[in-house]
Amino acid sequence: MITGMIENNLINCYDGNFRAEDLRKWSTKGLIKCPACNKVI
Ligand SMILES: [Zn+2]
């Protein structure tokens, strides 16, 4: 995953604003969605 959406906020895994630990946690909870098709990543 390169980019995703959390509650309508666009996130980028590589911009350093989000810790990998948090991204993984959100992902396992099904909170991260694809910005293009809105499916859970
Ligand atoms: Zn998609």
Image (cartoon, grey):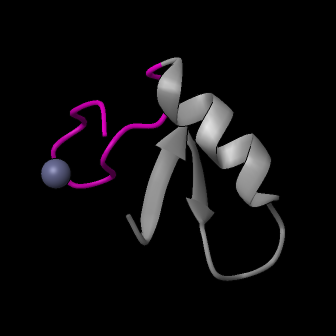
Q: Position of residue 2 (x, y in %)?
A: 43, 72
The residue located at (33%, 52%) in the rendering is 35
Instruction: Give the position of the N terminus as an image quadrant.
Output: bottom left
Query: In which quadrant of the rendered view does residue 13 lie?
Result: bottom right
Residue 33 horizontal side relative to residue 10, left or right: left
Assess whether residue 19 is covered by the magenta stretch. Answer: no
The residue located at (44%, 21%) in the rendering is 30
- Judged by its main secondary structure, the magenta piece is loop
The residue located at (76%, 48%) in the rendering is 21
Name above or below for residue 1 compared with residue 33. Answer: below
Query: In which quadrant of the rendered view does residue 6 lie?
Result: top right
Q: Position of residue 38 (x, y in %)?
A: 25, 36
Residue nearer the viewer, 9 or 22: 22
Residue 19 horizontal side relative to residue 5, left or right: right
Q: Which residues are magenta?
A: 30-41
The residue located at (53%, 17%) in the rendering is 29
Name above or below for residue 21 compared with residue 27. Answer: below
